[in-house]
Every structure is written in C-alpha cells, then in structure tokens.
Image: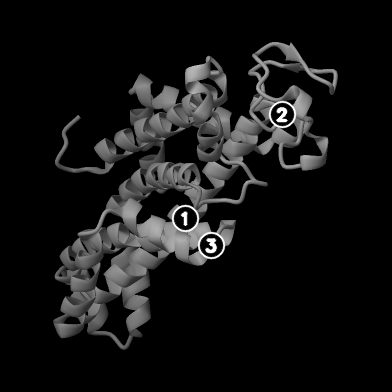
Amino acid sequence: MDRAAPLARFFAEFRENRSAVLGLAIVVTLLVLAVLAPLITPQDPYDLASLSLRDARRAPGFVGTGGYVHWLGTDAQGRDLFSAILYGLRISIEMGLVAGAIGLVLGAGVGTMAAYVGGRTEAFIMRLVDLQLSFPAILLAFVLAALLGQGKAQLVMALVAAQYAYFARTAHGAASAERSKDYVEAALSTPLPAWRVVFRHILPNALPPLIVVATVQVASAISLEATLSFLGVGLPPTEPSLGMLIANGFPYMLSGRYWISIYPGVALIVLIFSVNLVGDQIRDQLNPRLKR
C-alpha cells in the first residue's frame, strides 16, 4: 500500500490537468487504432498488388474499384489514405518508442557510468557527448540514415545515435548529484560490485529527469522519422510512413488535391502535440522546483 500511494497521488495530480488527460486519451486512441489497423482498415497499403492506378488521386468519399468508400481519398499510387494513415501511425509510434527506449538505456548507462567513474574518463566521455549535442539532431540523423540505407533497423540506429546524448547529459547531471550523497558513500564502503552501486542505487534515484526527457525524445523521434521519410532517406516506398505520405502529396498541393498531404500531416501533428501535452504534465509533476 505504501508503494502504491505515490503512484496514486501521481495519477490523481495528473487528472487535474484536463489538457494532459485529453492528450493521453488521444495518444491511447491513436495507439489502439494503429495496433488494430489490419482489422479496421479496408486495405493493406503495403500490398502493392492490391493497388490500382484507376483509384489514384481520388477525392474523399470516392468509391474505388475495391467496392469500398475511400473516406479520406487516395494518394498518387491509389492507396486508401485512411488505411495508409493508420499504418503510418504504427510506424511513427513504433519508431518513437523503440528509439526512445534504446536511447534511454544507452544514454542513461553512459551518463551514469561517467558520473560514477569520474576523473579524466568522465571528462572525456562528457566532452564527446557535448560535441554531439552541438550538432543539430536532424543533421546527424540525416547523415546516418543516408549512410546506413533504408529500413527500420537502420532508421532506429540513426535515431538512437542522434538522440542518446540528451539522455546521457541528463543522466550524468542527475547521477553526479546522487554520487555525492551519503547513501552512495555508505554503499561504496561495503564490498558491493561497482555495477550494483550504479544500477541499484544511483540510477533509480536519477530516473525522474530521465522519464521527462524520454517523453520529449519520443515526440522528437516521431518528428525526426517523419522528416527523414519526407526527405526520402527513411523507410522504403513499400512501407509508407506519415512523412512519406506527406511527401507523396506535396507535388499535388497546388492542383487542388490537398487531401493527399493534409490528412497525414494533421494525423502527425495531433500525435506529436498529444505526446507533448502528456510530457509537459509529467515534467511539471516530477520537477521539484515547480510548485503546483
């Protein structure tokens, strides 16, 4: 009961912010729609054999050759946009969560170990982290994605390499503050192995700021993935993400076929905005300097 009380207070305080609750509800709804996309969409946009060019660039409400209504219209390849958007959301959420989780583990380990070791090793590691932070994340991700090639694994590697430094810098600051506390000194006075002191004592107490950064970086990873796909260095054309859908419709904006780019863009904005709403509330609750 004692362990559940802080969690209950956290959710009770979270519910006081209606904007954050709305953002969480939207994120959960989009997540459910994305997971259930194969069951609720009339078309598999990855199955090129099922596409028909006779359905290409059709306006919303058009009844295609498949016999169903394209409620959001179709793109230049004849994809049903409703189906493509839900499948694109699956990619965006998957890339954001996977890249964020790997970046969190890698960055937290690097930053915490640097704070524990100290000395020249700490200075060397953190100067490398600071050097990476001096470059825009989109530039690093673009170069790495271009070098590694197209594919989910390559894209995740590019996103992690471009973002782990944010976790490392945050973990280092929090772990450095914990490193000088009495309970760490007491743990070091016992014959405990170094990894146990780091991962069982220092890192758990440095998690709150890392959780805040994780929510921000998930939204950032989603945005980066869409940007890279828009620029043509993300996923292959056979797996259209939201960024690629926007890019496919961009040449037709001035011809009146706005729906090809606008609807995927709206879905992307809603997803990122909702994640940021949740992240802002979590940041406020976990920041001891902000008095609510």
Q: Locate residue 202: give its quadrant.
A: bottom left
Q: Nearer the viewer, mark 2 or mark 1?
A: 2
Residue hosting label 2: 78
Q: In percent of the image, x 65 and y 13: which residue is there?
A: 60
Say the numbered circle drawn on residue 42.
Answer: none
The colour mode here is one colour
For this rendering, which residue is in front, 235 or 4? 235
Up-down: is 172 above or below 87? below
Report how far apart the C-alphas of labels 2 and 1 lie in the structure. Answer: 31 Å
Q: Amino acid at mark 3?
A: Gly
In the drawing, does residue 223 fall left or right of residue 38? left
Quarter that holds the N terminus: top left
Total of numbered circles in the picture? 3
* Quarter-of-image position of residue 76: top right
Q: Residue at the location (41% across, 46% down)?
A: 224
In this image, 201 relative to 133: left or right?
A: right
Q: Amino acid at mark 1?
A: Ala
Local SS, label 3: loop
Q: Mark 3 or 1 closer to N-term?
A: 1
Q: What residue is shown with label 1?
A: 99
Q: Position of residue 31 (x, y in %)?
A: 58, 35
Q: Could you tell me which secondary element the residue under label 2 belongs to?
A: loop
